Amino acid sequence: MRDDIKRVAIKVKGIVQGVGFRPFVFSKAVKYNLNGLVLNSSSGVYIELEGKEKDIAAFIKVLKNEPPILAKIDKIEIQKLDYKGYDKFSIVMSKEDDGVISVSPDMGTCEDCLREMRDKKDRRYGYPFINCTNCGPRFTIIKDIPYDRDKTSMSIFPMCSECKKEYEDPLDRRFHAQPVACFQCGPSLAFIGEEMGKDEIEKAAKLLKKGKILAIKGLGGFHLSVNALNEEAVRLLRKRKNRYGKPLAVMMKDIEQINEYCFINEEEKKLLESPKKPIVLLRKKNFNLAKSISDNLNRVGVLLPYTPLHYLLMDMIDFPVVMTSGNFSEEPLCKDNEDALNKLSSIADGFLLHDRDIVNRIDDTVTSFVGGRERIIRRARGYAPQPLICHKTMESILACGSFYKNTFCLTRENYAFLSHHIGDLDNDKTYNYYKEEIEKYKKLFKIEPKIVAYDMHPGYVSTLYGKNLNLPHIAVQHHHAHIASCMAEYGIDEKVIGVAYDGTGYGEDGKLWGAEFMIADFKGYKRVGHLNYVSLPGGELAIKKIYRVALGYIYKDIKNYKEFLSRFDKYEIDLILKQIERGINTPKASSMGRLFDAAASLIDIEDEVLYEGQAAMEMESIIEEDKSYYDFEIISEEGSYIINTEGIFHGLFEDYRRKVRKGIIAARFHNSVIKFTIEMVKKLHYKYKINKVVLSGGSFQNVYLLENIINILSGLGFEVFSNSLVPCNDGGISLGQAFIANEISQIEK
């Protein structure tokens, strides 16, 4: 043994498999004259190094500061070992252990692969499944861990000699890239339809040029695609898919094409071009896209190509295309060829298929850049299943999430595995998908929950699922979970002033909450303010027929709203008013979503909506420059503050009666909400001496609302926090549930 030779073991945790980590370690070990080994384990990557102390130190510095592009290191543990006498550095087979492992999300095609795909001299020229350790499928093809080829859907494609050579060369970009393949040995395309052409992609392009609907098998499932400039074609897609109203996403060839149709800033450009390749909400520059893509809205969801297949297809057409999920409305994505051919044949005129199985279906992520930060709206491809790092040690918990925009969350040690977007649990297919994904995550991340948390709403199927598990269970109030989701993201452990604005959530008094002010931490909350309660005549019916919500708000002063009443059938209005008077099927709600619905109906923006949040989004889209606001009253009642909105509706309808432009009225209404929010926070700060303010709930997807509230409160000296990488809508609820359950379980021990 030489005294100047040291040996250390290094354990690296995080997203370190399937991202070129072992070849990176190999090349750096060779560079610094180090011997030893590296391998994938079930908890990350394990390294042993033997060499001079200064060389080991140099290696560790590079490991920490310059890891591979797609790697995300959460923790590095270093242990000194006795000298062993390695004579070289080796990459060895994976081994099992009990640690936590992170699975890399799927990533968009990298520049190196694109360059090869477009190089006529390259053997992968035009290959629609080109990938390397820096890009391509990951989560969507994995069956089990460790992430090795035999545990992915690529196991049925034996590598040819050339691919095998790349795969086994530690200094090659494709070293141990599990999906590595080429024309000779990998997946292939098939087109099913009537179009003629020299290859499958040309046939698909011809179909799109004719204004027909194409079903494309992508990374995480099928898309339905159509010419985004062809209004008739988009309307036909909506009709066949039974998706009316909800905005559709548009794929554009490159940033240059995006600039033709949308305003885009540098931060939005970075998001679009990042390896995650999400859908990004952008402001429309003109209205040249088909009107029914995002009718009456000033923003549209845009994404760039993110698979080789997308790039090859977009190269053959000169127009943007709609890219919407390949399913019937509200059902899970189709992911298998046979399933898609059966279910989508009544929608699509042609199918572009391939034979690489999708193991784990996943939607596209939807995000935006607002208030100086990325704001994720739907967390899915490119982001999930990457875990969130917790600022405290977590019990093994399953948080079941909400009913709408469902995600679930599993926690262990310092990790929270927030699932990808599951969807609304309003049909058996989505509910079964939800249960299947919980089992998959438990298996992949080796988590056996000891505690289950769920929403307080007794009728949510996610609640019933949690209650039926034979585990200690904790019910969590919906808006407390919203606030906790944001606190968890920022690692806040003290009491905050929580402002939760959304459509609905079950309250402890049995009423529907949705505009809540709380003094909250993970241990609990005190409800200290809310909007005045309003009757919702018809219950769920009022959420679609929003003129009913308006009637609930103006009921006590109905005589001053004759012009509004004249728009509707007198017999129906009389019935609704009697329903309110007698309290028949008129649940009480204090909801920001319903406040927006009532305002939108009163000024004739919409009287009926097709999806949650539609009226609010349309109202935000027409805002014009105006600084004034309508009167309101904050009443102190039994230790709580109630915001009386009567004056807001008086002022709003008076403006409407005087034919003030709707864009001005929309601005004044928004300003009123901003004003009473600020006034409430100031009162609570004075009373409770708390300076941290947390904003959460789906209503904070409203850009005008969020930016103005953040700016004003920050200007007043408050520390303001709002969700960023965790959705502020119900997609973030499960994270908040997990943190609250963790804290309560510690208290009860």
Image: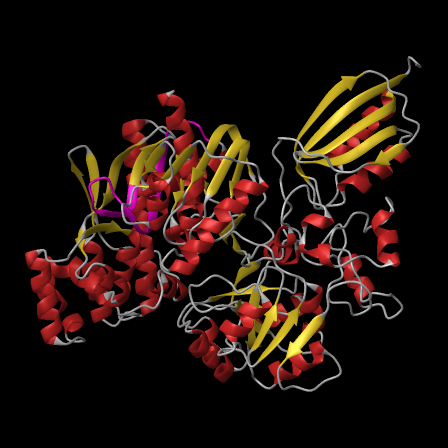
- x and y percent of residue 232 in the render? 48, 84
- x and y percent of residue 639 in the render? 19, 32
What secondary structure do most residues of the magenta stretch adopt? strand
Number of numbered discs on residues: 0
In this view, the residue in front, 73 or 662, is 73
Magenta range: 492-516
The residue lying at 69 percent from left, 44 percent from top is 147
| Residue 128 in the figure: left or right of residue 511 | right
The residue lying at 9 percent from left, 55 percent from top is 583
Q: Is 495 one of the magenta-colored residues?
A: yes
| Residue 337 in the figure: left or right of residue 408 | right
Q: Quadrant of residue 621?
A: bottom left
Is residue 561 in view from this perspective?
yes
In this view, the residue in front, 659 or 198, is 198
The residue lying at 22 percent from left, 51 percent from top is 589
Is 337 rendered above or below residue 508? below
Q: Quadrant of residue 622?
A: bottom left
| Residue 399 in the figure: left or right of residue 628 | right
Q: Is 360 one of the magenta-colored residues?
A: no
- x and y percent of residue 117 in the render? 80, 66
Is residue 703 in view from this perspective?
no
In this view, the residue in front, 480 or 397, is 397
